[in-house]
Image: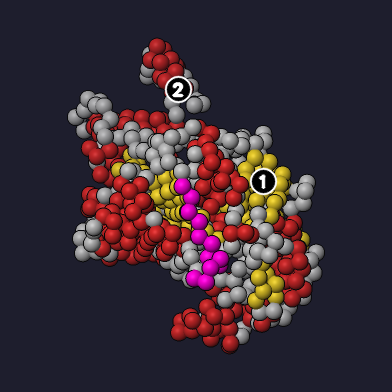
Amino acid sequence: MKAMPIAEHTSPLSAEQAEQLNRLIESLTPMQVTWISGYLAGINASMAEGAVQQPQPAQPAAQAGESARLTVLYGSQTGNAEGVAEDLAAKAESRGLAVTLVDMADYKPKDLKKETNLVVLVSTHGEGDPPDNAEELHEFIYGKKAPKLEGLKYSVLALGDTSYEHFCQTGKDFDAQLAQLGAERVHERVDCDVDYDEAAEGWVDAVVEVFGKEVEESATAHPTVTPMPGAGAPAGGDKDPYTRKNPFRAELLNNIVLNGRGSEKEVRHIELDTEDSGMSWEPGDSLGILPENDPAVVDELIGTLDLSPDETVTGLDGEVPLHEALTRQYEITTLTRPFIEKYAHLAESSKLDKLLADDARDELLAYMDGRHIVDLVEDFPVKGLAGADFVRLLRKLPPRLYSIASSHSANPDEVHLTVAAVRYETHGRSRGGVASTQLADRVGEDGSVPVYIDRNKNFKLPSDPDAPIIMVGPGTGVAPFRAFLEEREEIGAGGKNWLFFGAQHFLTDFYYQTDWLRWRKDGLLSRIDVAFSRDQAEKKYVQHRLRERAADVYAWLEEGAYFYVCGDANAMAHDVHEALTDIVADQGGLDADAAADYVKRLQKEKRYQRDVY
């Protein structure tokens, strides 16, 4: 650390003391300087009172005065809330707080009554549900055993997606219920959309400032027991070389259609070049792609607005032509209630205002179903609307996340994805997924896309390579399990592996069939059960295969197997969860409550993990 050296002629210190102090200061981090300055200020205050206290070693946070301890709880499905929580923990420690950073799944709900300073960072999963690792704590605070929390100071950061009706609902729940239990909100909740970086950073800085003042007051009042910064436990680790704000441009290596002729689906195997990027990942992580909107969709929207594509607008990073802003910077397809509300102020349409009324939620949802922003603009035109005003209504184009379908250990210079090209027609228009059709159609042979690694600590292989695993991955949900098996093959893991795969037809939709059969032949894949729903009169799905193999599934669980689910959250994940609970009840001879507890215990032990979307 660079600091102004102590001048001998102006200091009351001897030359030797000044030299020693200068050497010490040079070796200190900013965090350590902050602590020492508070410590010395406390000693000075005590000396002024004539009661000098002998310096004592720093005490654990629990003994250091509750005002100097901050508990950071996070509930995260994909890792976003966890990442922000780690940043907050680091900043809080630099202010002198002793931080305890805890995954909600590892937190004892009854400990809430022991807390004095608390921050909660939690995402909302699907239509208003808490993420898997937040379910128990969320249920607890609304239950009869929830304690009174007078004396607790707290703040909440909520992460969500405005394209869902119940935006940030879980964060709103925690915020409201903590207040209901008597806690004091010291900073207002912030609700973050998919582009959360700026809003989250502002909240973090404000919250650290609020709780940091507690440390300064505590350091003066109790200098002998001020905790050293770093007493908490924020997760560490090297920073990724490329991020959402600084992505790596990965060139396309391969684009292969996995479906056979006649399939109703279009799934692509995409390979991207990551050589020399320095990026690494673990099975279960996702690749973030910063997509571009389809130029044809951009042209149609500009035409419907009756604007010039060359009109200069203020984009996210300065002035750019309207066409460029709508292509690379803004979300121009997904229709959300917040966008409609802002647009309605300009449209001055009584019909649109009625759709936004509180008693017309069903009508609004019906209107939004299958429509994009261009449909709204067409149905409720605004005369004379400038491009500069229009872009201010839009949210930033969010990245798209795809489960990585390859092991870095096996393929260090390339990353594989399994991408379903989304194409459909509604309300007289052909539609397409922004990123999926870009990867399928618009990234040419020599093209590239900006990417980064999105880590998911809640979807990981067992640390014990000999632990058995059961993988349930219908459709493109099978992608991470290809990475799982590549990894286990590469490291020579001894654990048994069982895959449940489902799709529509055996002949056209058996993705990665050659890989599975090779691994089955080699003994790496111990078992594989498939469910092709349209190959017989009665539809069969992966949950049906699970029930048919109930005895063996339960036996594997009793042996310590890990149970993984990846894919559709709307129906499949719920049906598989229900099947798993029923299997435990039937095979274990348990009643409904005991079976539910068994499954919750699997989740708490990280033996039941889901990556559903």
Q: Is residue 350 above or below residue 274?
A: below
Is residue 45 something one can see in this rendering?
no
Q: Check the image and report above or below for 201 versus 49.
A: below
Packing grade of label 1 (10 A; few <14, some 14-19, many >=20) is: many
Q: Secondary structure at mark 2?
A: helix
Residues at marks 2 and 1, CA–CA distance in whole angstroms: 47 Å
Tell me residue 518's x, y (percent): 57, 42
Q: Nearer the viewer, residue 72 or 220?
A: 72
Picture disc at residue 607: none
Q: Is residue 394 left or right of residue 578?
A: right
Q: Quadrant of residue 368?
A: bottom right
Dot 2 or dot 1, earlier in sequence = 2
For the view shown, which residue lies furthest in the bottom direction?
350
Name the residue located 37 percent from the left edge and 34 percent from the top edge. Answer: 230
**Left or right relative to 79: residue 35:** left
Q: What's drawn in magenta, residue-wise? A: 527-538
Tell me where residue 166 appears, x and y as whole percent: 45, 69
**Side (left or right) of 487 relative to 35:** right
Label of residue 271 in the image: 1
Q: Residue at x 71, y 47 (%)?
A: 254
| Badge 1 amino acid | Glu
The picture places residue 161, in percent across and down from the top left corner, at 51, 63
Question: Disc 2 or disc 1, which is closer to the eye?
Answer: 1
Q: Position of residue 85 (x, y in %)?
A: 43, 47
| As drawn, 293 above or below 279 | below
How many tags in the picture?
2
- Residue at 74 percent across and 76 percent down: it is 304
Magenta residue check for 531: yes
Q: Which residue is mark 2?
A: 27
Mark 2 Cα shell of 10 Å, populated few (<14), some (14-19), many (≥20): few
Of residues 312 and 297, the one drawn nearer to the viewer in this rendering: 297
Please say whether residue 21 is visible from this viewpoint: yes
